[in-house]
Image (cartoon, rainbow, N blue to C red):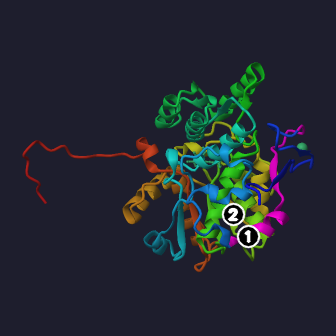
Amino acid sequence: MKYSYISHLSCPKCNKTYDHQEPQQLCTCGSPLLVNYNLDELGKYVSRDSFVGRTASLWRYHEILPVVNEKDVVTLGEGMTPLLPMPVIGDEMDIPNLYMKDEGIIPTGTFKARGAAVGVSKAKELGVTELAMPTNGNAGAAWSLYAARAGIKSTIIMPVDAPKITRNESAISGSNLYLVDGLISDAGKIVAEAVQDFVLFDASTLKEPYRIEGKKTMGLEIAEQLNWNMPDVILYPTGGGVGIIGIYKALTELKQLGWVEGELPRLVAVQAEGCAPIVKAWKEGKAESEFWSDSETVAFGINVPKALGDFLVLEALYQTKGCAIAIEDQSLLQEQKRIAELEGAFICPEGAATFVAARRLRESGWIKQDDVVVALNTGMGIKYPDTVDVEVEVLQKGEILRK
Ligand SMILES: Cc1ncc(COP(=O)(O)O)c(C=O)c1O
Ligand SMILES: [Zn+2]
């Protein structure tokens, strides 16, 4: 029995294959690469029951992850986040089976820990000593901390407007941190030059194949947490789209293994009204998106004007009969407050957008009353303290409270 049943990498555009035992970036045709596993062989040795009693981290699924040697696993205990019922807000929305997959409960406070754990582990296994990446903040924070744990040097470039705490997380890990007066796309151009000039491993979104594998574990966990049943709908706040691509890949692999049955959940890409290239492309029935100029939103993680894997996100939506929907900042901030008031959860603005989307899609009838619905909260609200307006009265010492 092997630790991993990885077989090779392949290009979803031109089908060219690559060796997973060498560091790989994009296909020669420019497409991201996907990881393939020998699922037939895996299925002979591993069953759904194998997971009972295993460690409560994403590494419980190591056979279907790309790290070949257990000694190369770099972990801070990430994964197996709660799948929480949301009865009060669900009742208000008329979705009785509403759940939140809460990625706030994970090292570094966002789901980016998953991609970083698996991406950094595989980079370590392949002998990478130095990596670079552009980020909207959370990924840079996670990758620099996991890289530090792996003894890998990191260069991180993020917009000056990225959440300040992510800047601190990167800085304290000892990474070479730079800010750019622009968007993630501007940071990406600088990284693209730097990797050529200084021979760094390019860990940009989807330019290395393993981040998807880390994020795919959200899909594996949702299925296991629902006793190997799939929900009817999964809503995901979509920026670069890695999470939604990963969840789609996970559920497809589970189906191939025969561990889940039935239709895949309808996947919903939730974007911000100020940056909605995937929504526009989906509405127009296109296979790829166009660059979204002057993008702006408080939900910083989903401010991605053009995603390299847009065609994979759109394919996941079309294949699952899903949809894409854009939410205004004002509405997602209201929802963020409502969820804290009604459910006691302080979630991130990106996560809050998925709840507004659920509310709207129920109102339009696209979500049915008996659907099992999972909204992804991709991070904890306390990473974005500035999105909350607080007015608090200051008392004098010894002052008495009046009702
Ligand atoms: C909190 C949060 N949610 C969602 C996203 C979007 O992630 P993806 O690239 O998987 O679409 C990000 C990316 O930065 C993020 O930080
Ligand atoms: Zn190709």
Residue at point 62%, 63% (across, down): 221
Determine the image quadrant of residue 141.
top right
| Magenta stretch: includes residue 311 | no
Picture quarter containing residue 395? top left
Viewer-closest of 324 and 320: 320
Q: Is residue 194 above or below residue 62?
A: above
Residue at 54% x, 75% y is 97
Which residue lies at the image location 61% right of the left edge and 46% below the top edge? 302
Q: Position of residue 66 (x, y in %)?
A: 74, 50
* Secondary structure state at the residue bearing disc 2: strand
Residue 326: x %, y % from top left: 62, 54
Callout 2, which amino acid? Answer: Leu
Q: Nearer the viewer, residue 12 or 185?
A: 12
Q: Magenta segment, which residues?
A: 28-48
Residue tagged by mark 1? 264
Q: Could you say which is closer to the camera, residue 271 or residue 231?
A: 231
Residue position marked by numbered label 2 in the rendering: 267
What's the amino acid at mark 1? Leu
